[in-house]
């Protein structure tokens, strides 16, 4: 036997193909990253509609106006955003060891994963923008309820899309970075990570208090505006992408 | 012949544990190589190192001439089927069969379908709900249908029944004959696979204790039985791997008998019997004191 007949070298896929295959891998079973979150969203939506309907039938016009103005600041959608972080953590911690069994390099896995969640961010913020627009046009689904289009977003559809895109990116990429800590150092890593995170936040609070700069912080938020503050999250988002890569690059899928 | 795998001075330590301890060996391209050893001997760690899933503490690894770590060019020719492989939650069998072709360029979908039928694997069932044997058969199917030039099977048939194991051996041999490649097979069921193996590596406590062709190994030890006095006389000065005795009858396993030795044994009225690969490996890895130097 000669070595020439031994092996049939596999076709060489380009770097981009390899990366996109990882992206597809995240979508091969859509249950966890698409179906479950939108079932939750549908549930929140249904509850909101029922509350709106009860209020309409039981309150006087004056009370209804008060209730609706209160709803303008609905944060229900915030839960959905935070849940995105959970989804990203679960998806990466489970898909990484699996992708390793498909002989995927960590680099291809990471880029493909970031791409998968960036794609989800675009799709989800588009969906919420469209729902927000319908909500606007139908005057709160005919019931004056607010879910997808909280008033602090302003009326601009482009702003609406931009804000959600940046927020989805923030939560997904935080999830990716957190999952990278997990696959690199497992439970011990998580403990140290959350302890460190708590200390950093505590440190910032202490710093602001000691230097009596809470009013300055408040002024900064007021001056920067909602869209501006959201834009600033792009800094931690980018950092999370970078740090996640550095961590995952040396992670091994031990059992 | 060219080397599929070349390992030099490879070690992997976890704290003070030497999972792989200064290992040097070569696996030639083409052929089925058995990577044998006891639980915790370092088999899985070694294969994780060879497939770039883990990082060496010291030493070098060359797979098809290059380091496998983060090397897409090498890894696309490698498939590693791990006994303890985790799948994403809520994954169904069909999700694996759908995504595997994206990552293995030689994937044969028809062959995979055939195997799914033969192993009676329910495509639509959640992987979490599969029996241990069915879980193993997913790995077996991916490992065979991917036709990777270098395929690792790490305990591929935990929980598989005898019929399914035989099916695996038959399919492996047949497909290997039609599509030659390099297969590294790690298992406890040594006698079951001994006819498949062309080369044997035995790892014990992180060290390679046997690295030889299966043929050499089979002829490397012989059981000699007869009256205790005759056996003792014959065994004197020879490498004794194992001894059983009942009353005046003794049976010893001796290493490295020459043709002259065999004639002498027969002349002395002793019985000679071959030692199975499994027996041989048990003899060589169960010795608690210093390792027996192996000579072919």
Image (cartoon, grey):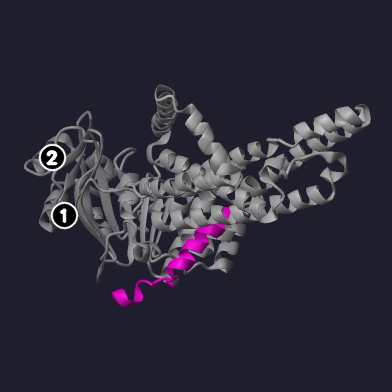
Q: Earlier in the sequence, mark 2 or mark 1?
A: 2
Q: Which chain is disc 1 placed on?
A: B
Q: Residues within 10 Å of mark 2 (few under 14, many from 20)?
A: some
Residue B59 location, x and y as percent? Answer: 19, 51
Let me know if residue A15 is in the magenta part: yes
Q: Which residues are magenta?
A: A2-27
Per the picture, the main secondary structure of the magenta-coloured stretch is helix
**In the rendered image, the vertical position of residue B245 relative to residue B41, given as above or below:** above
> In front of the other: label 2 or label 1?
1
Which element is circle 2 on?
Answer: helix
Q: Residue furthest left?
A: B237
Q: Nearer the viewer, residue A103 or B22?
A: A103
**In the rendered image, the vertical position of residue B62 relative to residue A199, given as above or below:** below
Which element is circle 1 on?
Answer: loop
Residue A247 location, x and y as percent? Answer: 37, 45
**Res. B230 mark:** 2
Q: Are marks 2 and 1 in contact (CB under 8 Å)?
A: no
Point 44% across, 53% down: residue: A110
Point 55% across, 52% down: residue: A117
Residue A248 location, x and y as percent? Answer: 39, 47
What residue does disc 1 label? B296
Tally of numbered discs = 2
Quadrant where the N terminus of chain B is found in the figure:
bottom left
Residue B125 located left or right of residue A170: right
Point 14% across, 55% down: residue: B263
Residue A112 located left or right of residue A121: left
């Amino acid at each position: 036997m000669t070595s020439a007949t031994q092996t049939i070298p596999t076709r060489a896929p380009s770097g981009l193909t390899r990366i996109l295959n990882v992206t597809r891998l995240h979508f091969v079973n859509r249950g966890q990253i698409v179906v479950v979150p939108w079932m939750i969203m549908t549930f929140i939506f249904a509850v909101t509609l029922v509350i709106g309907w009860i209020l309409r039938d039981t309150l006087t016009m004056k009370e209804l106006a008060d209730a609706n103005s209160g709803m303008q600041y609905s944060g229900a959608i915030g839960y959905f955003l935070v849940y995105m972080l959970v989804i990203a953590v679960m998806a990466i911690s489970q898909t990484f060891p699996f992708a390793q069994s498909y002989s995927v390099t960590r680099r291809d896995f990471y880029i493909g994963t970031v791409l998968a969640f960036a794609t989800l961010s675009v799709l989800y913020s588009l969906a919420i923008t469209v729902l927000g627009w319908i909500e606007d046009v139908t005057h709160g689904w005919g019931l004056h309820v607010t879910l997808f289009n909280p008033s602090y977003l302003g009326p601009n559809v482009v702003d609406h899309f931009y804000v959600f895109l940046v927020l989805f990116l923030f939560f997904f990429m935080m999830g990716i970075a957190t999952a990278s800590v997990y696959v690199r150092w497992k439970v011990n890593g998580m403990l140290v990570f959350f302890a460190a995170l708590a200390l950093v936040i505590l440190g910032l609070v202490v710093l602001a208090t000691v230097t009596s700069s809470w009013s300055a912080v408040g002024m900064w938020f007021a001056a920067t505006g909602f869209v501006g503050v959201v834009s600033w999250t792009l800094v931690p988002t980018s950092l999370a992408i970078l740090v996640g890569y550095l961590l995952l690059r040396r992670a091994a899928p031990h059992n | 012949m060219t080397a599929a795998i070349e390992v030099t001075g490879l070690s992997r330590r976890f704290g003070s544990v030497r999972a792989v301890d200064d290992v040097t060996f070569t696996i030639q391209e083409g052929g089925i190589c058995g990577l044998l050893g006891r639980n915790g001997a370092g088999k899985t760690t070694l294969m994780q190192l060879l497939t770039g899933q883990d990082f060496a503490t010291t030493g070098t690894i060359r797979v098809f001439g290059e380091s496998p770590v983060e090397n897409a060019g090498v890894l696309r020719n490698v498939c590693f089927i791990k006994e303890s492989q985790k799948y994403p939650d809520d994954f169904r069998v069909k999700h694996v069969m759908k995504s595997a072709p994206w990552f293995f360029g030689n994937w044969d979908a028809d062959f995979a379908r055939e195997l799914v039928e033969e192993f009676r694997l329910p495509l639509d069932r959640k992987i979490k709900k599969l029996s241990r044997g069915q879980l193993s058969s997913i790995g077996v199917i991916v490992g065979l249908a991917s036709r990777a030039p270098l395929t690792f099977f790490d305990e591929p048939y935990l929980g598989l029944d005898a019929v399914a194991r035989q099916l695996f051996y038959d399919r492996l041999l047949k497909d290997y004959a039609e599509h030659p490649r390099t297969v590294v097979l790690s298992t406890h069921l040594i006698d079951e696979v001994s006819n498949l193996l062309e080369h044997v590596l035995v790892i014990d406590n992180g060290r390679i204790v046997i690295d030889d062709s299966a043929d050499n190994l089979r002829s490397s030890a012989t059981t000699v039985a007869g009256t205790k006095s005759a056996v003792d006389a014959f065994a004197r000065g020879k490498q004794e791997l194992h001894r059983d005795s009942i009353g005046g009858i003794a049976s010893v396993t001796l290493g490295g008998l020459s043709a002259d030795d065999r004639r002498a044994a027969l002349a002395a009225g002793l019985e000679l019997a071959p030692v199975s690969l499994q027996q041989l490996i048990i003899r060589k890895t169960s010795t608690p004191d210093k390792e027996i130097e192996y000579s072919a």
